[in-house]
């Protein structure tokens, strides 16, 4: 089994602390479950109640979670049990109290007045109520937005992480194969989603599937002009174009993938969109390599679309890796014009050529690793409209 | 198909506005996706980017979401398209900007200085960064925690909602049946989770399954002393006790259910726990009825456990209904000592007798509706340790 070694955890923590020093932080409070997993290996479905990892500039890390979940942190993280503190069950879901009233008091003992403390101000499971509780408990200290500090450390993957993503890709392949096999005229959307989900979690005999951070998406026909709608029992009909967006996951690492599956005969405009996207994606994959600015990649895409008199408002892709619901994106690099990032080897992106046109949609995507000379795609499906039936 | 009528949406909104008046709110900003679905019917996997519904004390509701998701709101909600405003794609995931910088400016036009504005300060997808952006954009207005105002309106279900939960229960039954069928010595945990997930989403020929807010949980053997750990590829072995916690969902309404499945021969202490829980759950179900205080229900449970020299720190249950990841609970009523709620007809609860003992675990649960004279259970599985094999 691929192991995240103590040395790797130490390197991750050191990289975080280097950025903390640069940002002038005396401590960092980490709430994002993906960042918790990255730093201490903690992995459980406990993020619906408040939890926070205390990362001082030097010294021991302390994880605060609900009492019920403390044993799970002992089982899955490398932290010693004495640095895992459970807050009382009685504090869960109280209208006028918050667990961080208590946690904040404990933090106050570690953080003298004048301390500058980074918080994850835009993490999904760190609420304003939690923030205000910390603010009350920590008078005289400054709480500042860390601006995704840990997420930015995650952008360049280690070789171990890449190996885990290659395993996740096998679940992706199984899931997309299940989608292609099961989509057909007369079949309910939910029955296809069920087959995809089964394949995602089964994985293969060698690689078990973890739960993906997002459910399978199947925008179909006219509704495919809209992303992010989830399935119903609607049955596929002749000439439906079905956009399939899914990911395989293994030990929280994700490899997303999108393809469009055609039942029957595509319209001329869908064929034109397919051709434009194929050209744009090919240009993008040709452009990506260590040292290339993200902006250059975005321009290659825009130029190809422009040649076909098309445009796309939304970003072309984003950094991926560890994910928890509701997102497998890392909330760092966005592949779009103006992003200041320069590509580095072992950055990983979901490049998603999603065209949500009026009355129809078309998507093709690849999850890729940047290499010294180009790009590695994690999966191998034809980059075209996949036609099925007559 | 069961329809949520315009009249029902109007009743829901009126109930919210009554509470707003009581709380002295000039407006309410709703971010919780379950509350959005409840009030306007909006349903999409868009909650990983900021979104907010503006509910003034009187006048038109306005929904602010990412430009990409605005068409999905037009498709699924009853709001007219002109009251669905998409913020620019360029604002997604910026380190020093937030979409609510723009949304806040728009809200400022509607909300004169001196306005008191309720926010959902502990909702999962409303971040401190979003809160601080609103605070900056709305000087001279007071932002106050609504303390789950809409969630509390959701506690008593309409007959239509109860009908939807009865449909969800069919997916629950299919999923628990799949769990019982597939758990066996030598089988990987993930293969069981895959079968459960497939059954959850397939539902039945009549009732399609929606995605549950939480993945299937299968804490097993010694690790069953810990809730909320998700599956791995570990294979079940002889004498494993497998705790299964899952839900069926239909149109976002949830019916959760837990049972413990025994492979081989249970230990004496597991049998003793089973007997205590059976007695406690029976007493609880006998106690529940319209007009009974929640505290009385909690006491019935504690008394039964005490007779068996057992205790449980965590709450016995919570209000359920509409759910989005990461939680199917409503974050309102908790069945525990001291909760001031008095039961009313059509309240619905997940009563979860979860005993996380040192080295093993045991769970039995029921999702119930309070009736005038007692209780309706949504599913029908024996309330005991389910033994399998020899």
Image (cartoon, coloured by chain):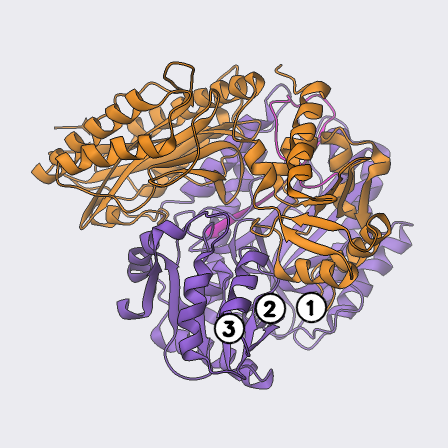
Chain colours: A purple, B orange
* Residue nearer the viewer, A180 or A5: A5
Residue A22 included in the magenta stretch of the image:
no
Residue A240 included in the magenta stretch of the image:
yes
Question: Relative to B8, does residue B68 appear above or below in the rendering?
Answer: below
Q: Main secondary structure of the magenta part?
A: loop
Q: Which residue shows up at 49% across the image and 78% down it?
A: A27
What is the number of the mark on residue A148?
2
- Residue A184 visible in the snapshot: yes
Q: Which residue shows up at 40% across the image and 74% down it?
A: A9
- Camera-nearest label, 1 or 3: 3
**Do pointers 2 and 1 mark residues of a single chain?**
no
Secondary element at image label 1: loop
Question: Relative to A323, does residue A268 appear above or below in the rendering?
Answer: above
Instruction: Identify the chain of the residue marked 2, using the numbered disc in the image.
Output: A
Other residues around mark 3 within 10 Å, as few (<14) / some (14–19) / many (≥20): many
Query: Disc 1 marks which residue?
Result: B95
**CA–CA distance in space, label 3 to label 2:** 22 Å
Question: Relative to A152, does residue B151 appear above or below in the rendering?
Answer: above
């Amino acid at each position: 089994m691929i192991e995240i070694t103590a040395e790797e955890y130490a390197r991750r923590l050191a990289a975080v602390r280097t950025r903390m020093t640069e940002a002038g932080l005396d401590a960092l409070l980490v709430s994002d479950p993906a960042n918790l997993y990255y730093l201490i290996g903690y992995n459980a479905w406990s993020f619906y109640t408040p939890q926070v990892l205390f990362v001082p500039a030097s010294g021991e890390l302390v994880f605060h979670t609900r009492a019920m979940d403390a044993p799970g942190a002992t089982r899955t993280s490398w932290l010693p049990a004495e640095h895992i503190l459970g807050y009382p069950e009685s504090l869960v879901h109280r209208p006028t109290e918050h667990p961080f009233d208590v946690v904040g008091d404990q933090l106050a003992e570690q953080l003298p007045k004048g301390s500058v403390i980074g918080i994850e101000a835009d993490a999904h499971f760190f609420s304003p109520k939690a923030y205000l509780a910390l603010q009350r408990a920590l008078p005289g200290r400054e709480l500042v937005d860390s601006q995704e500090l840990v997420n930015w450390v995650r952008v360049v993957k280690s070789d171990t992480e890449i190996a885990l993503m290659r395993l996740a890709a096998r679940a992706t392949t199984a899931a997309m194969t299940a989608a292609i096999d099961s989509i057909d005229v007369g079949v309910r959307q939910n029955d296809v989603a069920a087959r995809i989900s089964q394949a995602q979690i089964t994985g293969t005999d060698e690689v078990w599937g973890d739960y993906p951070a997002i459910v399978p998406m199947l925008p179909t026909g006219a509704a495919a002009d809209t992303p992010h709608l989830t399935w119903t029992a609607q049955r596929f009909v002749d000439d439906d174009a079905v956009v399939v967006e899914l990911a395989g996951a293994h030990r929280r690492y994700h490899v997303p993938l999108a393809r469009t599956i055609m039942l029957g005969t595509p319209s001329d405009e869908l064929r034109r969109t397919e051709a434009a996207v194929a050209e744009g994606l090919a240009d993008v994959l040709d452009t990506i390599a260590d040292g290339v600015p993200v902006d250059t990649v975005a321009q290659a895409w825009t130029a190809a679309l422009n040649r076909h008199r098309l445009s796309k408002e939304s970003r072309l892709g984003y950094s991926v890796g560890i994910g928890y619901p509701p997102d497998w994106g890392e909330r760092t690099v966005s592949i779009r014009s103006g992003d200041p990032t320069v590509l580095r080897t072992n950055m990983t992106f979901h490049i998603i050529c999603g065209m949500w046109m009026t009355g129809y949609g078309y998507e093709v995507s690849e999850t890729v690793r940047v290499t010294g000379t180009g790009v590695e795609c994690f999966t191998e499906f034809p980059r075209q409209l996949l036609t099925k039936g007559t």
